[in-house]
Amino acid sequence: MSLNYDALMASGSNDEPFCYADVDTMLYALATGFGQDPRESRELDYVYEGQALKTVPSMAGQHIDLGFLADCGWDATRVSHAAQQLQLYRPLPVAADLRVDRRVVAVFDHGRATGASILLESEVRMAKDDTVLYTLGTTLRAGGDGGFGGPAGAPGQPHRMPSREADLLCELPTRADQALLFRLTGARAAVHADPQRARDLGFATTPLQEQCVAGIACRAILRTICEYDFTLISGFDLTFAAPLYPGEHLTTEMWQDRNIVSFRCTARARNAVIIDNGKCTLAAS
């Protein structure tokens, strides 16, 4: 079975109901590392509702349901997230009832050895009044599905990184069991739990989920630039460049130019770029 280009381009869903509760908000924050450092009391507001519970902006990227693509013919075990473009029109609520429109906007064939890129767009609205909460562009890499005869090409140009030395830097640890913990948020692919499955797919061991890594990067920016004010982040774009493994440290370099924070994340111990071409847009204070 091969990737079905026509079926993909016709795929979409409208007014799909979706909801999350405060426990989901707290679990996402906990699974991306908030609350690990008992000396940082400001992180408690992301994992405990005692004062006023806060939401991690990157959690919006976690609200991706690929069920509407189930019959497109791809090898689901080799599908990964390659990039995202997130635009928040208002801060994420602690809990919400939502309606989602999803569609495939482009598919690119990179050849049998490389795979295919699938570009999705989602518009997420509040169910109570139909106002748009955020839009999310997602690029998926179907690693086992190139060479199906689809159009060549590539996704759009990524954010251009500054050429100067980084203005700020934040290094955060990950836990040995973090991929297992993050699975409880819904990202339950076996590759993140089964070491043999991970090795069969070319990983050194079970990698962290891409959306978990995005959350760690968002935590670094909240901590270093935003003083943990989640309402300051109105955009969060990035490219996933390489896997991060549980137990590694993630170093986030940041360049601030007015309301744009460019960022790159690395696993310095093995000199690997994990996230590249990051662009965090800050809202007016």
Image (cartoon, grey):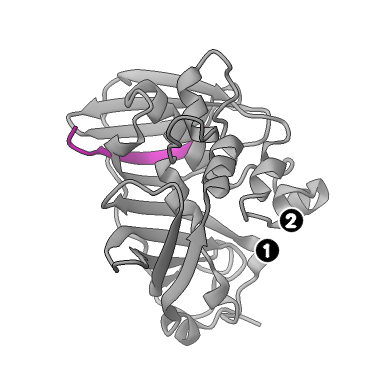
Q: Amino acid at mark 1?
A: Thr
Queried whether the magenta region covers residue 1, the answer comes back as: no
Foreground label between 1 and 2: 2
N-terminal of the pair, mark 1 or mark 2, is 1
Q: Residue at x 32, y 46 (%)?
A: 91
Residue farthest to the right, as pictured: 196
Find residue 190 and name its label: 2
Residue 226 in view (yes/no): yes
Left or right, 241 with reference to 228: right
- Give the magenta part as a residue range: 273-285
Predominant SS of the magenta segment = strand
Q: Residue at x 45, y 37 (%)?
A: 53
Left or right, 267 with reference to 103: right
Q: Disc 1 to disc 2, how far (Cα)?
A: 8 Å
* Near-viewer residue (147 or 192): 192
194 vs 214: above or below: below
